[in-house]
Image (cartoon, grey):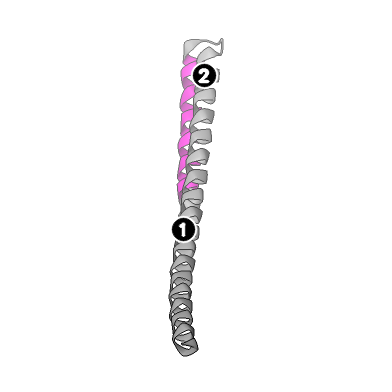
Amino acid sequence: MIHDELQKLEKLAHKIQAKLQEVKAQNEELRVQNSALSSELQEKEQEIEHFKNKIKISNIVDNRTVNPEDSTEMKDLIDNYIKEIDQLITYLSD
């Protein structure tokens, strides 16, 4: 009788240990997934900030009161700077 109860408890302990290992594996998988998603979110937030800055610069150029030739030249210059910055960000992110 006691021997049967002991065997049942051992089987239960093995089942619990197996379930614990399964839960630990799932937990680790979720941690990795969470880390990847956090990194992706941070990248997206940086991209949003970059685009916001592009819009702000374009608005500054558009609202600047100068003659049209200077405004166009300034806008082209700033657009070129933005392209260079984009290339640098792409290079650094790789």
Q: Main SS of the magenta segment?
A: helix
Query: Amino acid type of disc 1?
Result: Leu
Q: Is residue 66 above or below residue 84?
A: above
What's the mark number on residue 93?
A: none
Residue situated in front as seen by the camera: 15 or 36: 15
**Disc 1 versus disc 2: distance between alpha carbons?**
43 Å
Query: Mark 1 or 2 closer to N-term?
Result: 1
The verdict on residue 82 being magenta is yes
The verdict on residue 73 being magenta is yes
Residue situated in front as seen by the camera: 35 or 43: 35
Extent of the magenta region: 69-90
Q: Position of residue 77 (x, y in %)?
A: 49, 28
Q: Is residue 69 above or below residue 75?
A: above
Q: Is residue 64 above or below residue 3?
A: above
Q: Could you say whether the residue bearing mark 2 is in a helix, strand or loop?
A: helix
Q: Position of residue 68 (x, y in %)?
A: 47, 11
Badge 1 density bin: few <14, some 14–19, many ≥20, Cα 10 Å: few
Q: Is residue 33 above or below residue 77?
A: below
Which marked residue is nearer to the observer: mark 1 or mark 2?
Answer: 1
Residue at x 56%, y 13% (from the top left corner): 64
Query: Amino acid type of disc 2?
Result: Asn
Number of residue marks: 2
Residue at x 45%, y 68% (from the top left corner): 25
What's the mark number on residue 59?
A: 2
Residue at x 49%, y 25% (from the top left corner): 55
- Position of the C terminus, as image quadrant, is bottom left
Q: Could you say whether the residue bearing mark 1 is in a helix, strand or loop?
A: helix
Reading the image, the residue beneath label 1 is 30
Q: Position of residue 82 (x, y in %)?
A: 49, 34
Residue situated in front as seen by the camera: 60 or 77: 60
